[in-house]
Image (cartoon, coloured by chain):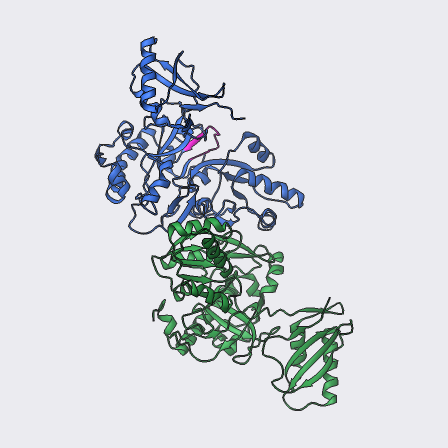
Chain colours: A green, B blue
Amino acid sequence: MEYFDKLETQDPEQREREMFAALPRQIAHAKANAPHYSRLLADIDPESIVDRAALAKVPLTRKSELHALQRTAPPFGGLLAGKRLPVKVFVSPGPVYDPEGATEDYWRAARALFAAGFRPGDLVQNCFSYHLTPGGSMMENGLIALGCSVIPGGVGQTEMQVATMADLKPVGYTGTPSFLKAILERAVDLKRELTIKKALVSGEAFLPAVREALKARGIEAFQTYATADLGVIAYETAAREGMMVDEGVIVEIVRPGTGEPVAPGEVGEVVVTTFNRDYPLIRFATGDLSATLPGRSPCGRTNLRIKGWMGRADQTTKVRGMFVHPHQIAEVTRRFEAIRRVRVLVENADGNDRMRVLCELVNGGTDALREEIEGAVREVTKLRGDVEFVATQTLPNDGKVIEDVRKFS
Amino acid sequence: MEYFDKLETQDPEQREREMFAALPRQIAHAKANAPHYSRLLADIDPESIVDRAALAKVPLTRKSELHALQRTAPPFGGLLAGKRLPVKVFVSPGPVYDPEGATEDYWRAARALFAAGFRPGDLVQNCFSYHLTPGGSMMENGLIALGCSVIPGGVGQTEMQVATMADLKPVGYTGTPSFLKAILERAVDLKRELTIKKALVSGEAFLPAVREALKARGIEAFQTYATADLGVIAYETAAREGMMVDEGVIVEIVRPGTGEPVAPGEVGEVVVTTFNRDYPLIRFATGDLSATLPGRSPCGRTNLRIKGWMGRADQTTKVRGMFVHPHQIAEVTRRFEAIRRVRVLVENADGNDRMRVLCELVNGGTDALREEIEGAVREVTKLRGDVEFVATQTLPNDGKVIEDVRKFS
């Protein structure tokens, strides 16, 4: 087994100690230099954030807020802590503007590339877009840091991608899995022989069937989980068991709508803290769902593992014209120690919206408790919800707090 | 007046001395490390190439040959002299593959950007394509070297380019002039205010009418002459008199089809020698036409100036099914000291191809001389050509050796 560096195989307790030893300084840096954090973390003493329990008390910054924050304080919503302008600025949907700083491998892609088998001297065709979105630059920086040579392919121009691959004989591909599939199929049409043997894919679901189809053509493809703000969060390894968390971030899984960590293995929202000095993201709620995997990876890496991307956490929906947010349901739950777990079902069987509030209780329930909870629901959401008690372990472990099962056609 | 560095205003004789003092080492480097030059320059003693007259004896490497050279010795035709693989590889029409090395501002774009008014701290939307072609990377590297921040816009997505510019308020634009025009027009449709004040444009003709239209919107746009192999060759300055040759190259203007420098001011093919250690281009014939400008620029820069791009030099054509190359016409000319200048006109007035060979002579001509020249034309081109003597200064100064005036419809 080869590793990118010694961090990957260190004692997990040592990793945890070192990360939380470094964290107070990072939080102090963010508070001192980024106006958003000066405000948000006003009551937080950085020196006190020395373990996961303490971190769990730090307020979240939500990806879904970034657009509004950036509108209020352009261009970066007061989250930039660097003294200088970023080297590059990208656009992701929202629009949200994403800075890239001057540090080598700013997006921490080299480690994921290494785990996917990329090595110094490899020639790689990078088919993420370089235009406006950061994908192309993210992967290119990582490839260059790793010592690879890059053909900046970008997206589209499938025929020219094929011709370039056939002529230059790159061994590696980075991009979406579907575009790799399109390139391979066009190469067959054009009767051109390709030499791709390894791939790091991202940006969309990577289904086992696609992975097997690539394998059948001699291509070992691995996926990485990365976002336009954070860069690489986790990456697949040869063990093919979930995804290994990157060494440069702290990942928590929380109950959607809250900042509270879920029990190990439970599905929740991915919350990430980086050590990026230019653009520190402290408890950044991605809006993505995932869950931790128990145990240790057979690949020898010792970091926390998560399942892949399991959907979007933001389940805000409109019921009878009123928004219902996951954090409102969390607020209702918080008021009752008797409640273990809640799931709201939004239905419209008879054409009218109906909100069912399914509760798993710690012990048995009473009619009085049911009425109290219904009162709390009305108070918090301004909507009527029918509370039902369900047996323990009945509600699915999929991170959903609000499930919209209405049919509109 | 501000300058990028002291090189720009140095005594021209000193520049010439220093460039030619450095040239033997560069030629020796190319001969020693790049197989193409080991072969091509086998008979050239690098130490002897100490001035323009000596350089004029060095064999050309033609851009038009690159594709074939690269097919024979992939991927770079034996022109690469670096010990390591290039950091990036691009594709230009042919296809020809263009390496980018690891040096900062590899394509020497920062100087041209500075002359166009770009300064450290400027936020710039870079609308050259990053995908497969080197334009985006060329400009981005120069901008970053200069200390600017880059929005990697790329091409297309005009509406998102407008929205991004309106939100982020970049002061600078790099890209084609026509795409800037399209962005400005779309901004009017979308009622978005843009803040672009400076632009460096390239990649297509930049007509005075477009320049004036941009100026009317408060944008000072300058052009640069750059190619996918050489990077920046020349750039406009505030003087608006032709284009200043870059400090990192030696530019010659030669008679198309030959390596012989033309008289000052005469139109010919642009031949460039770089000091690039990774990918040395020694007497690289671009296939582009231009001419030197006499005198000194009012902007204070002291380097040679050339007119902008004046068309393509490659006038190879097919006459009665046979290729006629400019170098064949040059060969005919070379045989007769009596000839000052030749221009071949290819006509088909009666539906049959006819080749007229117009000659300016040093002195008066005789029937015997005409027959001798016609014999040489037949011998060299395997085609009959009718030789006509014309008065001195009759042939236009447009770099054309073969002019095809046939009508095919």
What residue lies at 31% left-to-right and 14% top-to-bottom? B372
Q: Is residue A110 visible?
A: yes
Q: Is residue B315 visible?
A: no
Quarter-of-image position of residue B265? top left
What residue lies at 61% left-to-right and 58% top-to-bottom? A94
The answer to whether residue B194 is above or below residue A73 is above
| Residue in the foreground of this view, choosing between A77 and A150 | A150
Please tell me whether residue B243 belongs to the stretch shown in magenta. Answer: yes
The answer to whether residue B97 is above or below residue B404 is below
Q: Quadrant of the N terminus of chain B?
A: top left
Please tell me whether residue B379 belongs to the stretch shown in magenta. Answer: no
Q: Quadrant of the C terminus of chain B?
A: top right
The answer to whether residue A325 is above or below residue B353 is below
Residue A218 position within the rendered picture, expressed as x and y whole percent measured from the top left? 40, 63
Q: Is residue A316 left or right of residue A279?
A: right
Query: Which residues lie in the magenta part?
Result: B234-244
Residue A237 position within the rendered picture, expressed as x and y whole percent measured from the top left? 42, 70
Residue A110 position within the rendered picture, expressed as x and y whole percent measured from the top left? 40, 62
| Residue in the foreground of this view, choosing between B163 and B227 | B227
Q: Is residue B101 left or right of residue A186?
A: left
